[in-house]
Image (spheres, rainbow, N blue to C red):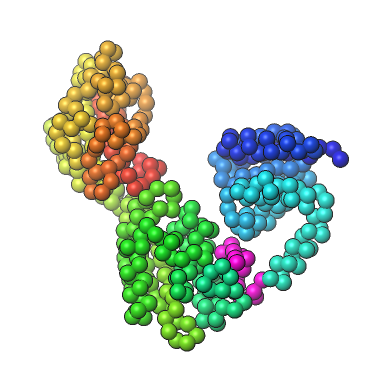
Amino acid sequence: MSAVQFLIADDHELFRRTARSFIESHPNWQVCGEAGDGIEAIEQAKRLRPQVILMDINMPRMDGLEATRIIRRELPDCNVIIVTQNHETIARQQAAAVDAKGSVTKSEFTQGLPATIKRLFESPVAETVEGARTETSLTPGWVRGGALGQLVREFDWTKTPLGAIEEWPQSLKTVVRTLLTSRFAMWMSWGPELTFLYNDDYARMTLGKKHPWALGKPSQVVWKEIWDDIGPRIHRVLETGEATWDEALLLFLERSGYREETYHTFSYSPLSGDDGTVAGHLCVVTEETDRVIGERRLKTLRSLAGELSKTITEEEVVSCIARCLGENQRDLPFTLLYLFTEDGNEARLACQTGIAEHHPAAPESIPLSEKNLSEKNQPWPVSELLNGKDSIIVENLMERFESVPSGSWDKSPWRALLVPITSQGQDKPAGVIVAALNPFSPLDVRYA
């Protein structure tokens, strides 16, 4: 048998290197090429014609699923295997949706890839038939829905207080089926540990990295970081049988690797067991994070634009900026406005918000001459903006200044954005705004 040729498509160099090392440790496997995004994967596939393409999903320019569709259409002899961090059930569904020949989770890569290659080249038909037979024999017919429906069917519920899925009470089956088939984001709890179940829309909208880990866990474990906020509401529903309602409630979720400012409108409703007593609760929810934060930022921009239109002198402009930016200390915990002197040798503090005078992070002037460009003399790298940079992100503020004000939050910002003040007809900026950033919100295009 000739060596199987692999193309590795993944935007993380470390994974490509790890995958290459593993593949080349097999005597009949060879890596013929690598790609860092979907478009490059297509180009490499057409040029190299590999027998197997290991395709990551989340990549820049073009994701792996779209790249797989194109490759399978234009190069039907190429066997694409989806390699992803998603749960194996979701990975299988994603692979099937784009006509990939298989899927492997990254957590089980070294165990799963050999078995997948064996099925692919030795007995694909027999394995497919056997897999279909096994799944059919084990699948409860009442469980429907998308990816979460499949997860619920395959989950080992005997390890939870709910017990074997075939033995669930009719009341639980009914509400779970409603949950899984709904197009509205929902989650629910049931039983003595308030076992957590949810649907596809809730996974996409709110869970983030907690999906699919959260399925079958106690609700208090899933939402440990906000249990002080939602726990009393849930227990009130369980004790009284009365529903709750909250609109745009602020909750600090830890679903993306950091504590995040989020807003949710939701209702908790009681769920009754077969005996009529309250056995759990159902949450129907809409996340409103983008709306609430977007409206807050838009209010600041509108206020600033409206006020600036009425100004004439430099003093009025500076006063206007301080007043408008100071009203939004959630998105801008503190700000500094520096104006450059005419000779370009110094940046002088014109106004500040959210930070005390003479604070180490708010010096009255920053020297810009060549001999004073050391970090000691420049607490902020303002001079870099004079060299044409559009903006500068400064991180680790607590290490840089020991302490900085937190604005409206209980946590100080850890990074700031430096933006030049420019106007038409000027070759160089007139000054710079230093804006500390919300520690609970990502720096993305919406922030800009």
Give x and y (percent) for residue 266.
37, 67
Give x and y (percent) for residue 309.
20, 40
Is 276 displayed left or right of 439 in the figure?
Answer: right
Residue 321: quadrant of the picture? top left
Q: Residue at x 60, y 48 (%)?
A: 107
Give x and y (percent) for residue 312.
14, 34
Give x and y (percent) for residue 441.
36, 47
Residue 340: quadrant of the picture? top left
- Residue lying furthest bottom in this view? 275
Q: Residue at x 22, y 34 (%)?
A: 336
Membership of 146 in magenta stretch? yes
**Quadrant of the image for the N terminus?**
top right
Residue 292 seen from this side: yes
Q: Is residue 344 above or below residue 84?
A: above
User: In the image, which residues are magenta?
Assistant: 139-156
Q: Nearer the viewer, residue 162 or 53?
A: 162
Q: Nearer the viewer, residue 421 or 94?
A: 94
Q: Residue at x 34, y 34 (%)?
A: 396
Is 385 displayed left or right of 329 in the figure?
Answer: right
Is 226 displayed left or right of 132 in the figure?
Answer: left
Residue 398: quadrant of the picture? top left
Membership of 39 in magenta stretch? no
- Residue lying furthest top in this view? 371
Q: How many marks?
A: 0
Is 365 displayed left or right of 152 in the figure?
Answer: left
Residue 81 seen from this side: no
Q: Residue at x 36, y 23 (%)?
A: 388
